Image (cartoon, rainbow, N blue to C red):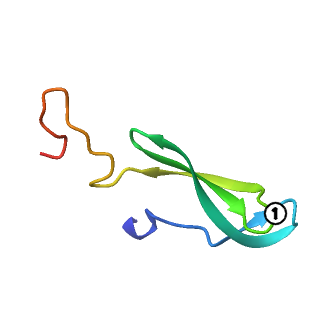
Amino acid sequence: MDQFDQFRAASLYCPKCRTATPARERLLLVLPDGELMEYLCARCGTSVGKKKTRAGLGAGLLPRPGGRPDYL
């Protein structure tokens, strides 16, 4: 289902606060095939989850060694 490809969590359960709290996204790592994101509790800063996103069209497009870009 394409509608859930870019799902973002608004609130997640925080084990430290012991309740569902608003979550902030933080970029952890940029990978060749996407990005690794971490969700943090907005109240205390505890890590409450991670997600890996796939690179979309226009993201991270680099030319091949032959000089021709991947998208052509």
Q: Secondary structure at mark 1?
A: loop
| Horizontal arrangement in the rendering, residue 69 relative to residue 24 (left or right) | left
Residue drawn at point x = 47 percent, y = 43 percent: 30
- Corner quadrant of residue 39: bottom right
The answer to whether 8 is drawn above or below residue 59 in the figure is below
Q: Position of residue 24 (x, y in %)?
A: 64, 65
- Residue 10 lies, in percent from the top left, at 63, 73
Mark 1, Cα crowd under 10 Å, few <14 / some 14-19 / many 20+, is: few
User: What residue sits 33% from the left and 54% below the top?
Assistant: 56
Residue occupying image coordinates x 17% and y 46%? 71
Task: Kindly identify the amino acid type of the residue bearing the numbered disc 1.
Answer: Cys
In the rendered image, the residue lying farthest to the top is 65
Quadrant holding the N terminus = bottom left
Q: Does 36 sit left or right of 57 as displayed?
A: right
Q: Position of residue 41 (x, y in %)?
A: 74, 63
Task: Locate the C terminus and report the quarter of the image it occupies.
Answer: top left
Q: Quadrant of residue 57?
A: bottom left
Counting from the top left corner in percent of width and height, residue 3 is at 41, 70
Q: Name the one closer to the observer, 61 or 11.
A: 61
Give whichever of 71, 60 is nearer the camera: 60
**Residue for badge 1:** 44
Q: Quadrant of residue 13?
A: bottom right
Question: Does 22 sit above or below residue 15?
Answer: below
Horizontally, is 4 left or right of 12 in the view? left
